[in-house]
Amino acid sequence: MEDMKEIIRTYVVNEYVEDDTEVSFDTPLISGGIVDSFSMVSLKRFLENKYKISIPDDKATPEAFDSVNKICALVNEFTK
Amino acid sequence: MAYTDKTRGMYADIITGLKDAGLFKQERYIHSAQAADIEVEFPEGAELKKVINICANNYLGLSSHPEVVKAAHAGLDSHGYGMSSVRFICGTQDIHKKLEKMVTEFLGTEDTILFPSCMDANAGVFEAVLTKDDVMISDRLVHASIIDGIRLCSAMHDTFKHSDMAHLEEKLQLHSDKRQKMVITDGVFSMDGDTAKLDQMADLCEKYDAMLFCDESHSSGFIGRTGRGTHEKCGVMGRMDIITTTFGKGLGGASGGCVSGRRELVEMCRQKARPYLFSNTIAPPVVAGVIKVLEILSATTERRDKLEKNTEFWRKGLTEAGLIIKDGDTPIVPVMLFNAKLSQDVSKDLYNEGIYAIGFFFPVVPQGQARIRTQISAGHEIHHLEKAIEAFKKVGKKYNILGKTKAEIIEMYGM
């Protein structure tokens, strides 16, 4: 689980952060303006490819993607 | 009649909020034709002031060129004022087809379709050629009109970091399963004045079987050795799949735009693009004016050559004065001030010195990136630029920003 959190955190930082903003596991990503709604697409596709899952569009909501912890919970829901 | 006091109050509060936040846009009224020297009424009711304009998109100085004005007059006389119809009913004249052919030749593409504006071209093109099975991968700094067009399209959308080719390649790999992939960029980015790496993008598109789209609104007519645009500068003429551009900037400055590119894609726009199907096209006098503009630019590179020299002079002058400008070689030259209020104050003081230039700040540019965006024209003479540089020096001295680093300016004024 910790591995998954770190992998997702690293992806978010590399993909979306272009300054020295710190991202913790609880940092609000969408509501905090780090990830915009356009860019959620690549995050969803990254998760699907990495963890060999399929996240239905109605589950890929801004709320479900709003922190690393919440994203991990979403991924776990579909890997079980 | 349901516009109640409550409704009026709601909108009035929103407008007040914009004013309080410093986001309220106020127009300045120009009483002369668009040119290097203009007469401005500002604020409303004030006496007219003669100023040098360094914030127009009039890159080639053709907005009031006598030959263009004369051609527009002739077009008005021969083809009338308006069409009162969309293109496919009874709104297509011989001159519309002539202009489409001329643009195709000028840009080195296969075919062209006119739109009422480039905003409309960008709003219509993506939904006309892509479906939900496809993906659009755009630079994160593309123009607002492209973002709106992307929003109107059912294809998946993803972004890559500004001009980051490694990141673009990652995205092309990520979306390799999509039916069609389209990479989307501006040729010259309007806020920073930098140029897309179209040569590298064309290579990546060929490697990953993707189409390449470029908005050339801030480059058509003057970027590249003969002014064809960024694709000429990058050596990829003939490798572009879609180019959109405007006739409202360098190419005469009136209005209108187009989609130019692969024959089938242009035909898809003709059949399906909603701003084309449900709006009148460019009015006859403007079409006649743009035809003359293309004739002038096809006959000689004199104007883009002069613009290039003016740009070099301007960039050197500002740098030697000790101001911070964005690197590049285009006539869009942002003078970086970082602080929003400082950009507004400098703009105001420049105006008092007879120089018309506008401050841009968040949300038009990122937080802490406030600037005065200056735009150079072939219509400027060296004496215009010298006067403007002197004004920048005087105002820069007042605010103690000459020769200062970014960190020093931020320390004095904040982000």
Image: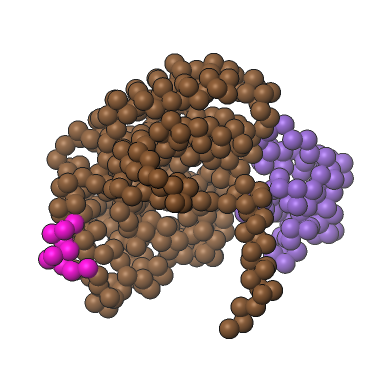
Chain colours: A purple, B brown
Q: Is residue B311 left or right of residue B92?
A: right
Q: Residue at x 12, y 66 (%)?
A: B78
Where is residue A64? Give x, y as percent: 79, 57
Magenta stretch holds residue B74: yes
Q: Residue at x 51, y 63 (%)?
A: B153
Q: Write the start and end of the magenta stretch as one range.
A: B72-81
Q: Is residue B78 left or right of residue B384?
A: left
Where is residue B229? Give x, y as percent: 32, 40
In the image, residue B119 sits, relative to residue B201, either above or below, namely below
Q: Residue at x 28, y 48 (%)?
A: B33
Q: Residue furthest bottom?
A: B1
Instruction: Report the number of discs.
Output: 0
Residue A14 location, quadrant: top right
Q: Residue at x 13, y 59 (%)?
A: B74
In the image, residue B38 sits, relative to residue B337, either above or below, namely below
| Residue B47, visible in the rendered structure | yes
Front in this rendered view, residue B118 or B184: B118
In the image, residue B71 sits, relative to residue B303, either above or below, namely below
Where is residue B415? Give x, y as percent: 67, 32
Front in this rendered view, residue B328 or B33: B33
| Residue B401, visible in the rendered structure | no
Where is residue A34? Give x, y as percent: 71, 45
Q: Is residue B364 left or right of residue B4?
A: left
Magenta stretch holds residue A41: no
Q: Quadrant of the N terminus of chain B?
A: bottom right
In the image, residue B309 sits, relative to residue A10, either above or below, namely above
Q: Is residue B395 left or right of residue B104?
A: right
